[in-house]
Amino acid sequence: MYPDLTAKQAAELVVSSMICGGVAMIYPFFGMAVVSTVAAIIPLLGPALLVSSQSSYRIFMLTGTTAAVLGLLAAAFAYRVIVRTWLRMGEVFSTTSSVVPGES
């Protein structure tokens, strides 16, 4: 079909297409991870800087920052509970094996 295309060039084309496809497939997940990390850190960075200064509102900022960190930890814990529950529900709703006691 293409007489000028050698086997080595065809292999390089396939490998480079696979690499580019892999990067294109992973790129959105990397972006979401960066955005979520920045979204979690930036709201805590400002109050942390105010707490470290000599502001008269330090105690309020410290309380707010502590509440934000606790909220972040609670969200992470809730996420883990949801994932575990989802996996258990997947076992229950699975059609690949019997879930009725006594049936094999």
Image: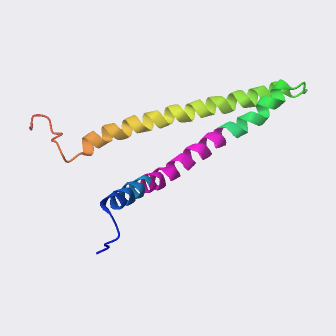
The quarter of the picture where residue 56 lies is top right
Magenta residues, start to end: 20-40
Comparing 91 with 29, the one in front is 29
Q: Position of residue 64 (x, y in %)?
A: 74, 31
Q: What residue is rendered at 30% in x and 60% in y?
A: 7
Say how the picture is coloured: rainbow
Residue closer to the observer: 11 or 27: 11
Q: Is residue 34 magenta?
A: yes
Residue 43 horizontal/vertical position (percent):
72, 39
Which residue is drawn at the image coordinates 64% and 39% (left, top)? 40
Principal secondary structure, stretch drawn in magenta: helix
Of all residues shown, which one is farthest toward the bottom? 1
Q: Image quadrant for the C terminus?
A: top left
The residue that appears at 23% across and 45% down in the rendered structure is 94
Q: Residue at x 42, y 52 (%)?
A: 19
Query: In the displayed structure, does residue 77 sit left or right of residue 83?
Result: right
Q: In which quadrant of the rendered image does the N terminus lie? A: bottom left
x then y, percent, for residue 51 = 81, 26
Is 71 one of the magenta-colored residues? no
Where is residue 55 shown, x and y percent of the image? 90, 27
User: Which of the 4 image quarters holds residue 12?
Assistant: bottom left
Is 77 placed above or below 22 here? above
